[in-house]
Image (tube, grey):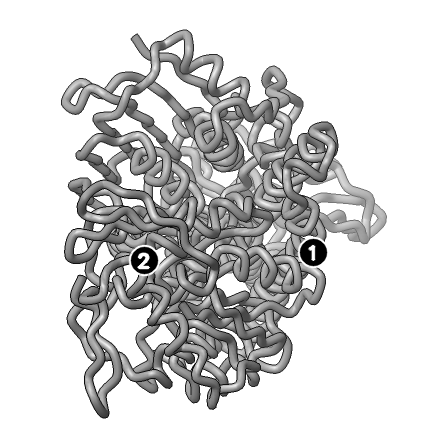
């Protein structure tokens, strides 16, 4: 029942990708299809690059660094403590060893000097072993029956080591080789450091715990600081959105100093682009003027005086100039120079058409459900609506209806109660408009321009019979800019 | 009908002037915005054809100032600018019709006639008053009894102005102004001659003379 031309570029299907952040790259779905050259999904449809987040990379590097520093501080501190502890214990052990050596008996296994009583209590944690050259081994009573190896060191040698002792004690063992009256002997004195090592381990664990929580705290603080900083970026982003929506014409420059140059550059760019658009439109207007007056003159030559071929060619040139100039003037998507105000612009157009068709009585019904301003170029939309309404006014017998609705798309419907078109004819009209073969004055060219605009905005154009009025119904659907979706 | 043609393209202006003259309009020509503004303010025109891209003062500004000064003659914008925004702005500035270049002269004439009829509050497409009907295509008048009467160019212009203002006293000066362009010598008594000829063709009572006021078309 209806025929439609779908001008949507296949890449830009609005639901092709999950809704990411607003500024995410819109990969290569720009127009470039002036001639309707719809290609298959091109190379533009590649994966979106992995989002790089400033905050995340800051968190990784800074968090990792801080954690590393704190942990190595803890480790170093613990190690230094351990060293100090060992030195301290070792010097005490050396003192005890001196007393021990002085008390080595010539015979028997009893030390002849009084030693601290801890060496007598079984498994007290303080032990000694003396290995004499004659085979005697003097052991402290505290060792009880625990076997204890003593390294045979040459006289003058000494060694400090940590080793497992009885009852799983961690012993700090000091050993040394001596010589008395030509016979070498070895002395080993040990002290249990388990309790102290336990404390050291505790210090280490607490240190690690503190480092981890310190790093977490730092990340939290950093997150908060960054959020605060990025709230300024959010403000700029909101501004950009309002710019796209046409509520403002430039970004506010009261932003943090770091961002001011960026915002300034953007404002300059926007202004330059706007000026450029205005300039090229003015230039095209002048060109149109320059070309059209001679053509008008050609057409003034009465039919009798001019060869029909000349007149025909002049007419054809006129149509070509009209079409190409209009086409060149279209702004298409992107940030529009002036925004379309559906209600007001439709009212203006209807008032204009009432004057242009003053001799024709017809009722205009407008049903508009849209925001006050839409981020479509006003001139493009005036051109689109103007041509549609003009066609309707031309063919109507008394009633024209305009419907304009913003939901997921901008949908425009223009219906009349004129003769209308059959589906096959509609298809022909659309393609004929494209080829600019003007055999139905008015319909062809107007629809061709409408087709151009719809194509520029990746929309859909559909001709059918109006169910309510019986004449032509033209339906245009344009996808909304991202900020409105 | 006195018409102000504002057009800066000399060749097009000359051709238009000829075509409009042949259709029975007294045409004054202005080729820039300043002159157009002055003429439109100081003279009493029945119609104006206005180009938008004018030297010295843009057409839209001219139109806006005319309207601000209370000049209410119908204005047709004739321009190369064919965007709908231009049309909307032109009509907002106070234009009554809009025609884009290039155009067919026949279409311009048809639109001017429609403008005149509307300006004189007529719904029907033909100018008719008190039983007479004016055939603008062939520049003739049809009497109430159905008889066709041939008219010369000046007779046609004069009668059209009478028929657009039936029952109103029209002074000789006003008639001269609306029938001839500004180069015409206003002291001439040529209006009297043409009124007499119209009376001969339409009947003695068709046009009444009012002393001190001028003529009244009564049919």
| Residue at x 38% of width, y 57% of height | B97
The number of numbered badges drawn on the structure is: 2
> How busy is the neighbourhood of tag 2: few (under 14 within 10 Å), some, or many (20 plus)?
some
| Residue at x 34% of width, y 83% of height | B172
Q: What's the distance in space between the residues labelled 1 and 2, CA to CA?
A: 52 Å
Q: Is residue A227 visible?
A: no
In the rendered view, tell whether residue A413 sits above or below residue B113: above
In the rendered view, tell whether residue B34 sits above or below residue B3: below
Q: Position of residue A30 (x, y in %)?
A: 59, 36
Q: Position of residue B142 (x, y in %)?
A: 28, 46
Q: Is residue A457 visible?
A: yes
> Dot 1 corresponds to which residue?
A287
The quadrant the C terminus of chain A occupies is top left
Q: Secondary structure at mark 2?
A: helix
Drawn side of residue A172 relative to residue B61, left or right: right
Q: Nearer the viewer, residue A49 or A79?
A: A49
> Dot 2 corresponds to which residue?
B201
Q: Secondary structure at mark 1?
A: helix
The quadrant the N terminus of chain A occupies is top left
Q: Position of residue A440 (x, y in %)?
A: 48, 24
Q: Nearer the viewer, residue A141 or B182?
A: B182
Drawn side of residue B103 relative to residue A252, left or right: right
Q: Nearer the viewer, residue A258 or A59?
A: A258
Asked where in the image residue B213 lies, by quadrant, the reply is bottom left
View extreme (right): residue = A182
| Residue at x 43% of width, y 61% of height | B76
Drawn side of residue B63 relative to residue A65, left or right: left
- In which chain is the residue bearing label 2? B
In the rendered view, tell whether residue B206 sits above or below residue A175: below
Query: Mark 1 near mark 2, Cβ–Cβ under 8 Å?
Result: no
In the rendered view, tell whether residue A434 sits above or below residue A306: above
């Amino acid at each position: 029942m209806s025929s439609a031309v779908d001008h949507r570029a296949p890449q830009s299907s609005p639901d092709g990708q999950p809704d990411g952040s607003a500024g995410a790259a819109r990969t290569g779905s720009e127009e470039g299809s002036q001639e309707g050259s719809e290609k298959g999904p091109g190379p533009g449809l590649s994966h979106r690059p992995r989002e790089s987040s400033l905050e995340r990379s800051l968190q990784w590097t800074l968090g990792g660094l801080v954690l590393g520093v704190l942990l190595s501080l803890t480790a170093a501190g613990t190690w230094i403590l351990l060293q100090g502890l060992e030195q301290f214990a070792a010097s005490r052990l050396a003192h005890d060893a001196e007393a021990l050596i002085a008390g080595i008996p010539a015979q028997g296994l009893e030390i002849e000097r009084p030693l601290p009583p801890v060496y007598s209590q079984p498994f007290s944690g303080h032990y000694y072993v003396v290995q004499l050259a004659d085979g005697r081994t003097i052991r402290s009573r505290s060792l009880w029956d625990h076997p204890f190896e003593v390294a045979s060191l040459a006289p003058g040698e000494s060694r400090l080591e940590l080793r497992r002792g009885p009852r799983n004690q961690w012993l700090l063992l000091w050993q040394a080789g001596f010589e008395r009256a030509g016979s070498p002997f070895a002395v080993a004195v040990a002290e249990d450091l388990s309790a102290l090592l336990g404390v050291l381990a505790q210090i280490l664990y607490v240190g690690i715990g503190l480092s981890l929580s310190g790093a977490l705290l730092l990340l939290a603080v950093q997150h908060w600081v960054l959020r605060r900083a990025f709230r300024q970026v959010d403000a700029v982003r909101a501004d950009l959105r309002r710019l796209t929506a046409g509520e403002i014409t430039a970004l506010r420059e009261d932003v943090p100093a770091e961002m001011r140059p960026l915002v300034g550059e953007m404002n300059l760019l926007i202004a330059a682009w706007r000026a450029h658009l205005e300039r090229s439109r003015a230039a095209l207007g002048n060109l149109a003027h320059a070309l059209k007056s001679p053509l008008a003159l050609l057409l003034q030559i009465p039919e009798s005086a001019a060869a029909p071929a000349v007149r025909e060619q002049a007419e054809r040139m006129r149509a070509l100039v009209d079409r190409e100039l209009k086409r060149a003037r279209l702004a298409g998507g992107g940030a529009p120079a002036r925004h379309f105000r559906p209600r007001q612009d439709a009212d203006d157009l209807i008032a204009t058409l009432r004057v242009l068709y003053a001799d024709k009585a017809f009722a205009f019904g407008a049903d508009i459900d849209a925001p006050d301003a839409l981020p479509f170029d006003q001139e493009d939309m005036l051109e689109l609506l103007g041509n549609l309404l003009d066609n309707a006014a031309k063919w109507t017998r008394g009633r024209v209806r305009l419907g304009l609705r913003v939901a997921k798309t901008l949908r425009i419907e223009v219906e009349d109660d004129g003769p209308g078109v059959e589906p096959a004819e509609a298809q022909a009209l659309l393609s004929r408009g494209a080829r600019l073969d003007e055999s139905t004055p008015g319909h062809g060219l107007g629809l061709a321009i409408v087709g151009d605009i719809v194509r520029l905005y990746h929309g859909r154009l559909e001709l059918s019979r109006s169910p309510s009025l019986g004449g032509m119904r033209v339906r245009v659907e344009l996808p909304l800019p991202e900020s409105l979706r | 009908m006195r018409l102000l043609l504002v057009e800066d393209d000399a060749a097009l202006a000359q051709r238009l002037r000829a075509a409009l003259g042949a259709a029975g309009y007294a045409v004054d020509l202005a080729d820039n915005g300043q002159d157009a503004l002055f003429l439109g303010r100081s003279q009493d025109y029945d119609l104006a054809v206005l180009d938008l891209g004018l030297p010295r003062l843009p057409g839209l500004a001219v139109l806006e100032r005319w309207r601000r000064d209370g000049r209410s003659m119908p204005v047709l914008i004739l321009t190369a600018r064919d965007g709908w925004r231009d049309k909307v702005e032109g009509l907002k500035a106070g234009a009554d019709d809009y025609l884009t270049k290039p155009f067919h002269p026949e279409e311009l004439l048809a639109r001017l006639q429609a403008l005149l009829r509307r300006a004189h509050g007529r719904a029907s497409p033909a100018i008719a008053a008190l039983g007479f009907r004016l055939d603008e295509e062939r520049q003739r008048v049809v009497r109430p009894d159905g008889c066709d009467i041939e008219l010369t160019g000046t007779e046609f212009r004069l009668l059209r102005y009478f028929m657009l203002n039936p029952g109103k006293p029209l002074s000789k000066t006003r008639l001269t102004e609306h029938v001839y362009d500004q180069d015409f010598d206003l002291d001439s008594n040529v209006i009297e001659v043409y009124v007499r000829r119209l009376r001969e063709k339409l009947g003695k009572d068709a046009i009444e003379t009012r002393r001190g006021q001028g003529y009244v078309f009564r049919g």
